């Protein structure tokens, strides 16, 4: 698959995915992705985007009832939640930030246990209204409030590679990209020649994983092509 990159990391590019690399990104998620018989997925991710294709294929492999939403605005998402009653909702942060939680019925809201934002970072003022809805299981007990899974990734990285989870109990919202997922073999901040930079220096975020497509960052020098790179 040749995927369109939206240009978040600079000039839009065309990352290349293969069957092998694409599935490597899903291997660990097969054991952790919500897939109880009661789970239902609502996705607002663009159909043609690598993220949309990735999560839809995950749902097909696990047999999860799924609604793919055509409109990615907050009002359409709220209406779809009320009609479809999903247990978890996926979307880019802009879509999730637009959801007016007062338009989600209590009946539909109580079944939601997770929100999945990915791509760019989400903000506390957008996360807290969503995590106040629904309920989730913690150590066998059901407690009020849902989880917001904030994932950082890009088409150049091949998948979401950094994640952090927020709940109603979360008190610290530092501007962090999250912890690397298990698929990450190495991660570093690089200069344009592919050399590691010390803490506090700005540069390119270099990530090495089995799922990473060939490097498509802002430079094509040989040292950097060993990494999938994105502007940090």
Image (tube, grey):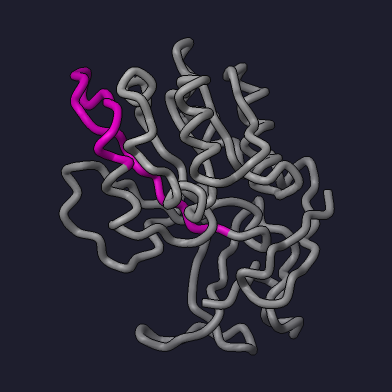
Furthest-top residue in this view? 37
The question of residue 176 being in magenta is answered with no
Q: Which residue range is magenta in the image?
A: 130-153
Q: Position of residue 131 (x, y in %)?
A: 29, 40
Residue 46: x percent and y percent? 68, 46
Point 29% across, 57% down: residue: 124
Residue found 61% across the figure and 60% down from its top: 154
Q: Is residue 137 above or below residue 131?
A: above
Q: Residue 54 at x, y = what percent?
A: 66, 40
**For the stretch drawn in magenta, what is the main secondary structure?**
strand
Q: Residue at x 72, y 74 (%)?
A: 225
Residue found at the far right of this picture: 2
Q: Residue at x 60, y 51 (%)?
A: 159
Residue 158 horizontal/vertical position (percent): 65, 54
As for residue 145 lying within the magenta part, the answer is yes
Q: Nearer the viewer, residue 162 or 109?
A: 109
Look at the picture and state if 191 lies above or below 225: below
Query: How many dots with numbers?
Result: 0
Q: Is residue 104 left or right of residue 118?
A: left
């Amino acid at each position: 698959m040749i995927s369109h990159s939206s240009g978040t990391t600079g000039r839009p590019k065309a990352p290349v995915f293969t069957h092998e690399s694409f599935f490597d990104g899903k291997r660990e998620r097969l054991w952790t992705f919500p897939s109880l018989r009661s789970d239902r997925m609502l996705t607002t991710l663009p159909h043609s985007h690598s993220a949309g294709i990735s999560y839809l294929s995950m749902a097909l492999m696990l047999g999860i009832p799924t609604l793919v939403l055509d409109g990615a605005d907050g009002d359409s998402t709220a209406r779809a939640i009320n009609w479809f009653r999903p247990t978890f909702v996926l979307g880019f942060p802009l879509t999730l930030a637009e959801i007016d939680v007062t338009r989600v019925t209590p009946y539909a809201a109580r079944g939601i246990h997770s929100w999945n934002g990915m791509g760019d970072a989400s903000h506390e003022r957008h996360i807290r209204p969503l995590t106040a809805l629904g309920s989730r299981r913690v150590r066998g007990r059901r407690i009020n409030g849902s989880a917001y899974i904030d994932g950082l990734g890009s088409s150049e990285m091949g998948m979401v590679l950094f994640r952090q989870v927020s709940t109603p109990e979360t008190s610290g919202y530092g501007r962090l990209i999250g912890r690397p997922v298990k698929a990450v073999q190495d991660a570093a901040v690089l200069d344009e020649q592919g050399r590691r930079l010390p803490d506090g220096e700005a540069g390119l975020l270099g990530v090495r994983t089995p799922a990473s497509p060939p490097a498509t960052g802002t430079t094509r020098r040989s040292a950097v092509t060993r990494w999938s790179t994105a502007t940090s």
